[in-house]
Image (cartoon, rainbow, N blue to C red):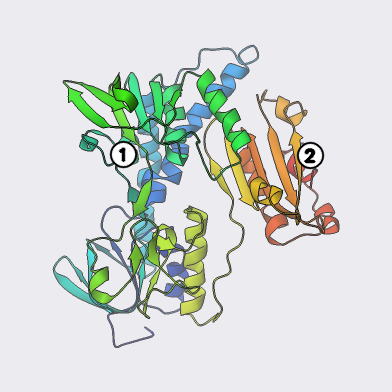
Amino acid sequence: MKNPNFDYDVIYIGSGHAAFDGAKTLCKQGFKIAFVEAIAVGGTCPNWGCNAKISLDGPVTLAKTQRRMKDIVEGDTKLNWKENIKHKREGILPIKVDREATMKSLGMDVIHGFAKFTDAHTLEINGEHVTSDKIVIATGLTPHKVEIEGTELSHDSRDFMELEDMPKRMAVVGTGYIAMEFATMANEAGADVTMFMHGDKALRPFYQPYVKILMDEMKASGIKFIENSGLRSFSQDGDEYTVTYADNQQLTVDYILDASGRVPMVHNMGLEEVGVKYDDKKGVLVNEYLQTSVENIYASGDVAATGQPNLTPTATFESQYLKHLFAGETDQPIDFPAIPSVVFTSPRISQMGVTVDEANASDEYTVEEHDATNTWFRQITKEPVVKNAYIFDKEHRLVGFTEISDQADNAVDMIVPAVNMKMTPLEIERNVHLFPSIGHDTWKNI
């Protein structure tokens, strides 16, 4: 233990990637560590986010691929949603169990309960007080609820991921990551899906020409979009629900999914009492060291208002930075790399680094767009659309990338080293990839 004046050297409020990834190394270096977890060990990512989502999406993409290749791979592929949920649970439960077992085997404590600050070094948990030299707020985000009459009748993303039977008619509020991904799943499982848009754009952070292609694909599969929906209320009559929107139009459905966004988990923690400043929408305010307005209290992951994308890789990077900071291995501010992101729809959209819009607004960059739909490798599984854009600086170093395709997640992952290491054309040339492969196809255009 590094500081015997407290019960712990570091307490993390939360046990997701924003905490665990860096903490396990600190523990091996002799720091006494504890996690306070109010809901589920592992946090959002394995339980209701990345792992769970991709488990449900796997059969969706498989079914879509089979239909494209129906003349080659015969059979009627129909998604069994109940079995899909069962399969997801079987894969997720061991993650949570193994994570807690790993924590304890390393000598870290896991305290189940809600944490509330009583002073800068003390937390009240289950009626007892524990102290720590440093405290890291890693509580993440929680689903947002639209502020309209009857909002309590809607369900959130956690509910959807435990949905035993897919309803026949579903209303989805929002067109962000979660809304678009879950609408794709529900549609493949047989639901008649209607999406209620706040404005006239979906997936706003992404390249809109590619978003339009995605929306056209979703429309072709039967998903309906209502732009500028002007939601007014939700109401219930027996087993049916009515969504009332602009000009008092109404839609009757069997299920309402509110995927209008996520908000920081900052309330009822005593942050105000100890002087930790936060923004209801952005999260806990931090400086370039992830330090809050209270010297020994830090924030990491989605709850931290860093301006970075709220993604698992971001949280992991931040937790590892704090590990280096606490261990005295650095005294420098956090230096974020470009972080890739992807929407797990069909097709997928990915992006990283400088965006096409940013590049087009500056004379510092050039954009090279490609339509790779008819390339040989992409036609193996008859991908319907493959488009990508490469953004280069004046030295022709790759600084940004975006793609829409079934393999967009793998494609963007391939170019991470080129962007973050600022590789020159010669250095890129020396990276020889497997052929045939997505890596080869992605790098050949750099």
Q: Please tell me which residue lies in front, 126 or 137.
A: 137
Please tell me how crowded label 1 is: few (under 14), some (14-19), or many (20+) other residues with Cα within 10 Å: many
For the point 58% across and 69% down, the residue is: 335
311 on left or right of 389 = left
Residue 82 showing in the rendered view: no
Tell me the tag on residue 399: none
Residue denoted by label 1: 156
Determine whether 395 is above or below 211 in the image.
Answer: below
Badge 2 amino acid: Phe
Please tell me how crowded label 2 is: few (under 14), some (14-19), or many (20+) other residues with Cα within 10 Å: few
For the point 35% across and 32% down, the residue is: 230
Residue 253 point in image, percent of width and height: 29, 21
Determine whether 218 is above or below 316 in the image.
Answer: above
**SS at mark 2?**
loop
Residue denoted by label 2: 435
**Picture quadrant where residue 260 is located:** top left
Q: Please tell me which residue lies in front, 437 or 429.
A: 429
Residue 77 point in image, percent of width and height: 50, 17
Residue 216 point in image, percent of width and height: 56, 24
Sequence order check, earlier mark of 2 and 1: 1
403 on left or right of 394 = left
**Picture quadrant where residue 256 is located:** top left
Residue furthest toward the front? 247
Badge 1 amino acid: Asp
Q: Quadrant of the N terminus?
A: bottom left
Residue 175 point in image, percent of width and height: 45, 36
**Comparing marks 2 and 1, which lies closer to the viewer?**
1
- CA distance separating discs 2 and 1: 43 Å
Residue 431 showing in the rendered view: yes
